[in-house]
Amino acid sequence: MIAFTKGHGTENDFVLIHDPAGSLDLTPALVRFLCDRRAGIGADGVIRAVRAGAVAAGEGVDPDMWFMDYWNADGTTSEMCGNGARVFAAFLESEAGVDLAEGLDFATRGGPRAVRALGDGRYAVGMGVYRVGDASAGFDSEVAARGMDPVRPALSVDMGNPHHVVALGSLEELEALDLTVAPQVHPVPEHGSNVEFAVALGFDDAGAETRGRVRMRVHERGSGETRSCGTGACAVALAMRTWAGQGAPDVWDVEVPGGMVTVRITGATTILEGPAVLVAQGAVSVP
Ligand SMILES: N[C@@H](CCC[C@H](N)C(=O)O)C(=O)O
């Protein structure tokens, strides 16, 4: 039997496993079973909380550090998961008694990250250094998707994991997309990509800071369409700011099908803010 917790961040859902010593043999087949919505528990991905020293967490990583061992539903791994990082934090608070008010540095396949509780069921994740692709022409690639005609220009954004962002002109276009089929990216990314489709909703300068607002949908590498993607929200905010040009806001409220997250662009990095909810605990027997 494997003890698990089920949680989500803006309805991007995960099976979480507390395995500090790394004693579980977490295989692609086991991940696919756990994520199966009919035969297993059901989730967009699996997150194992394991000490860095118990796995190959990378050169020079403090072995006592927590490692967020993230897996997509299809049994592949990813460098980083933004929504997952918030849920991972809530899980460590509840399962391992970690105090998140002071913040926690943790390890991922994409490098070190930091997370802090904001105190209202929300968490802020330091998402690491981003890299926006060649934006000299505004775009550096193309995306084709079912329900979207014709092929559209896209901008690549590296959030530790790969993204391509497409701007659409209306919410009707966004809703018309059929993301049950994976979008095609050209040139074909070597390691695949997460693809975001976004519609700018305008600026809000009523408060102390000007904020941009945008709505997105995403097709995730390894998981299909999900109801939210934290790294994707950061990629969308960065693409929107790039396209909006000089004077564009650094703070973006990003509407996703599962709720809303906020992205703060702070120089070379971003901070992702949003909720994390733990919904169930149990034990699963593996067939
Ligand atoms: N949903 C995640 C991203 C998960 C990884 C992604 N599918 C990939 O393969 O890179 C997020 O919230 O960032």
Image (tube, rainbow, N blue to C red):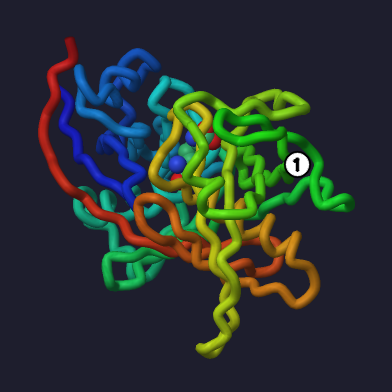
Q: Where in the figure is residue 222, as x and y percent of width and height?
A: 48, 26
- The residue at the point 64 percent across, 72 percent down is 250
Q: Nearer the viewer, residue 139 or 41?
A: 139
Check the picture and name the quadrant holding the C terminus: top left
Residue most extreme to the right: 136
Horizontal side of residue 178 vs 235, given as left or right: left
Q: Where in the figure is residue 92, as x and y percent of width and height?
A: 28, 51
- The residue at the point 46 percent across, 56 percent down is 105
Q: Which quadrant of the structure image shows residue 44?
A: top left
Local packing at callout 1 (Cα closer than 10 Å; few below 14, some 14-19, many 20+) is some
For residue 64, say whether it is visible.
yes
Q: So how many labels did they put on this image?
A: 1
- The residue at the point 70 percent across, 64 percent down is 241
Horizontal side of residue 80 vs 141, given as left or right: left
The answer to whether 236 is drawn above or below residue 274 in the figure is above
Horizontal side of residue 257 vs 24, given as left or right: right
Q: Is the residue marked 1 within 8 Å of ligand 1, measured from its CB?
A: no
Q: Nearer the viewer, residue 90 or 150?
A: 150
The answer to whether 10 is drawn above or below residue 2 in the figure is below
Q: Where in the figure is residue 69, as x and y percent of width and height?
A: 42, 35
Disc 1 on helix, strand or loop?
strand
Question: Which residue bears the numbered disc 1?
Answer: 153
Q: Amino acid at mark 1?
A: Pro
Check the picture and name the quadrant holding the N terminus: top left
- The residue at the point 42 percent across, 21 percent down is 74
Q: Nearer the viewer, residue 202 or 88?
A: 202
